[in-house]
Amino acid sequence: MKFAITSKGDHKSDMIKAIIEQYLSDFDLEVDLDQPDLVISVGGDGTFLHAVHHYFHRLKNTAFIGVHTGHLGFYADWLPEEIEKLVIEIAKKEYKIVEYPLLEMKIYRKNEAKPERYLALNEATIKKVEGSVVLDVIIKGEHFERFRGDGLCVSTPSGSTAYNKALGGAIIHPSLSTMQITEMSSINNRVYRTIGSPLILPSHHVCQFKPVDQSQSFLITIDHVTKSVDHISTIEYSVAEERIRFARFRPFPFWKRVHDSFISDQR
Ligand code: NAP
Ligand code: MN
């Protein structure tokens, strides 16, 4: 088995990275930064997002695991104190794989035949630096609403505890293959009307956003990445065919992670 370790880059994370690397090498496991079977991210959920984006091209052949050096994370859910145990598990055992859904986003631009395709682990959002976002929301080919406001967020189930939660979206169990659309401060009055509630779409529904003024420039975020994009004709969102694979060495149920992160870390 070949592995790669990524670190947040602070002193503590770098130290723990070095220790895990030493332990795994002692078990004759090999470092392979290009084609790892297992990627261990040391830091926080943000570090984990970076690691996953780095290896998005080989999701089928790579499993991920996260160690947190700050607060408990949703992806980074192993404690530094547990790494000896973790290393033994990695070296000795066949690990179980748990898969979570991802979001696919395709940006179609004016005068370009092929869309740019992206995958997100948490979410993709559309916003603007200045002024309101005005776009038509199309669900399964049917016009649903004209949105005016700060922006829209489309999240995965595992991303539902991140930005989506701050926007009033529901927390969704990652065993459900869905995507959720949440609003950022929509304008609602007698002239403008949006649904106002988060929408949860199944995996066979496609949703499109069509900017009303295609000459405008928008800010598109994909997890931790922000891009400025202009001449957008359509952005299409769906649950991706690909899934992210987590190496599970011990059970840590999603609802327990939710409890320990948001309610209390003592039972
Ligand atoms: P950041 O600004 O450092 O992260 C924001 C916070 O979100 C951090 O505490 C991060 O945990 C946490 N987080 C990331 N993924 C999560 C998940 N799936 N469930 C629960 N919490 C999660 O930026 P970043 O570390 O690069 O992370 C990018 C993410 O930040 C985006 O994908 C978006 O979800 C989130 N975000 C949230 C808001 C908001 O809540 N208003 C606004 C913008 C972006 P760590 O400290 O462990 O990294
Ligand atoms: Mn962060």
Image (tube, rainbow, N blue to C red):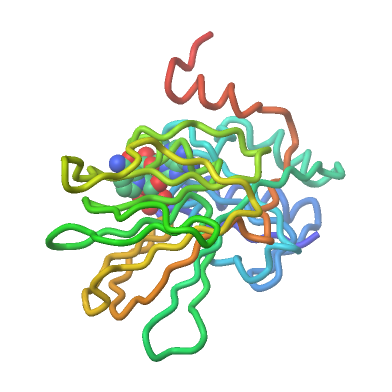
The answer to whether 144 is drawn above or below residue 232 in the figure is above
Residue placed most toward the observer, 45 or 122:
122
Answer whether residue 230 is visible to the viewer in this image.
Answer: yes
The reply to whether residue 44 is visible in this rendering is no
In the figure, is residue 229 to the left or right of 236?
A: left
Give the camera-side residue of 161 and 236: 236
Q: Is residue 133 above or below residue 203?
A: below
Residue 88 location, x and y as percent? Answer: 77, 39
Q: Position of residue 50 (x, y in %)?
A: 48, 59
Residue at x 32%, y 37% (from the top left corner): 196
Across and down, in percent, residue 241 comes to 68, 61
- Residue at the outermost top position: 267
Choose top left, top right, bottom left or bottom right for residue 112: bottom left
Tell which residue pokes out farthest to the left in this image: 130
Q: Is residue 194 depicted above or below 169 in this figure? A: below
**Image spot of residue 252 (x, y percent):** 66, 27
Q: Residue at x 55, y 58 (%)?
A: 140
